[in-house]
Structures are given as structure tokens and as C-alpha cells.
Image: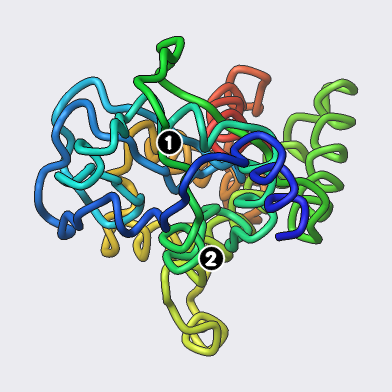
Amino acid sequence: MDTLNSFLDRKFAKNKRVPLKALTEPIRSGHTIPAGVLVVMASGDRQLRIKILEKDTPHKGFSAPLPLNEFAAQHKITPHYLFWFLSQQPVAEYLVARANGLVFLRVPKSTLMDLPIPLPTRVTRIRPAKEFSVVKLNNPFSRLIGELHNDYLLNTRNHRYRTAAILAGAICEVILYQMLIEQGVSPSHLENDRSLGLNKLLDYVRVLQLDQQTGFPISQLVELQRNRNEAVHAGRLVNSEREISAKDLEGFNLVVKYFGI
């Protein structure tokens, strides 16, 4: 907070400040977020994303839309001004340092709503921008996934695609397991599920409709689950004449891209 306050005191010494909650009005989950609204997005790749929507978008409860109220309009606050302020390095670093979640990064509502926003003293010209992101690094989950992914790359470089398929499946299991916990599924419930595996984790994802998020690689995860089963189950190993190839692992590239591994 000291770094943020120092930045505000230096750059906005003459500006009155109000908490963000004084400038916005809520949109309930299940309603539509109008085009032009600034959204702090829950990200699947451990990045804090700030975006001005280009079209009306259903609010599924994963992100924080910030529609501006009449008070904001009276004080010359626009979505582009708010975007510009939130993407200033000290502000973005303050938010991402307080974000929680190891898979889906979220800024706690209280942290976001209490953020001090300087009111412009005149109409401010802001260069238009649509999206900004900053990465949260150095957490144990990232290190674990990084180690598994390095093993995966080592095996693909040496054309050991069967082993790579097993590792890809293991990486996906770890990601989905953590993602479900962050969505409120009890860890003890998952631990006591004796049939828990990648296939069952995908069932949980569908029930919670997490696969409805834009770009969620559900079909690639299903295909990776099939390949992992073929690589690890004795019956399939003995009876299958098909060799797992690099092509069978192409879907994992989309998983890597989506989750920012």
C-alpha cells in the first residue's frame, strides 16, 4: 500500500480521491454486461486482465464488471480513464500482489472496490486501449506445473510421446483439481472421491459450467484424457496397434496457451 500511496501522492497530489465503489454500480451474475464496460477478468493463465468489452457479454460471475454510475460521469470518469489508471504499473502491481487463486487469478472484491481512484481535474485525453494484463509469478503451483512441463518437453524432444502423453494428462489433472478447489469444491470431497481422475474432473468442470468460459479447451482436454488412458492402461497397451505420435499431443499446446503454463 505504501508504494501505491507514494505513486498517488506523487502523480495525483492535487486530485481528490474516492474509492472505486463510489464510481460503479453492480451487475448481478446472470445478467448482461453491456459493451463498453471495463471488466477485471478472472484469468485462466494466472494473469490479471483488464478489458473494455467490445460487445454485450453474459455475466457468469467469474469476472468483475465495473459499469460507471452517474457520479462517475459527473466527475469525468470514463472506462478509458479507469483502464488507463488501473494499468499504471504501481496500481497493477498492487492489485496482482493481492490477487488470489492459483489457476483463476482474481482480485478480492473488497481490495478492488476500496482502491482509491483520483478524480480528474479536467477532461483527460487517454490513448484508447482495449486490454491489459500483468502476470503473477513465483507461486508453488507455478513451480510444480513448470517442473512437470519441463519433463514433458524433455520427452517430446526425445520422441517419447507415450510418456509425454502421460505427463500431459498429469499436468491437466493438477490444473483442474486446483481450479475446482478455487471454484468452491471441497478438497475433502475430491480426496474422498475414489473414482477421481482426469475424466471425473472433467465431469465436475461441466457441472460447474467452467467449460462455458470463452476459449476453455474442453475438447482438447477430452482428447488428452483419451490419449493418456491409451498410454497408461495395460489392456489398451497390449491390444492397441496405434502408436501415440506428436500429432496426438497438439491439443496440449492449446491447454498450455489457455492456462499460461
Please, is residue 258 above or below residue 156 in the view?
below
Q: Is residue 241 visible?
A: no
**Please, what secondary structure does the residue beneath circle 2 have?**
loop
For the point 45% across and 10% down, the residue is 127
Q: Position of residue 77 (x, y in %)?
A: 31, 34
| Amino acid on which disc 2 is placed | Gly
Q: Quadrant of residue 184?
A: bottom left
Of badges 2 and 1, nearer the viewer stands 1
Q: Nearer the viewer, residue 111 or 20?
A: 20
Please, is residue 174 above or below residue 229 in the view?
below
Residue farthest toward the front in the current orientation of the protein = 14
| Amino acid on which disc 1 is placed | Pro
Mark 2 vs 1, N-terminal side: 2
Q: Is residue 35 visible?
A: yes
Q: Which residue is mark 2?
A: 197
Q: Position of residue 229 (x, y in %)?
A: 57, 50
**Please, what secondary structure does the residue beneath circle 1 have?**
loop
- Give the numbered dot on residue 217: 1
Q: Nearer the viewer, residue 171 or 118?
A: 118
- Give the numbered dot on residue 169: none
Please, is residue 174 above or below residue 223 in the view?
below
Q: Is residue 158 left or right of residue 144?
A: right
Residue farthest toward the left in the current orientation of the protein = 31
Q: Residues within 10 Å of mark 1 (few under 14, many from 20)?
A: some
Q: Residues within 10 Å of mark 2 (few under 14, many from 20)?
A: some
Q: Quadrant of the N terminus?
A: bottom right
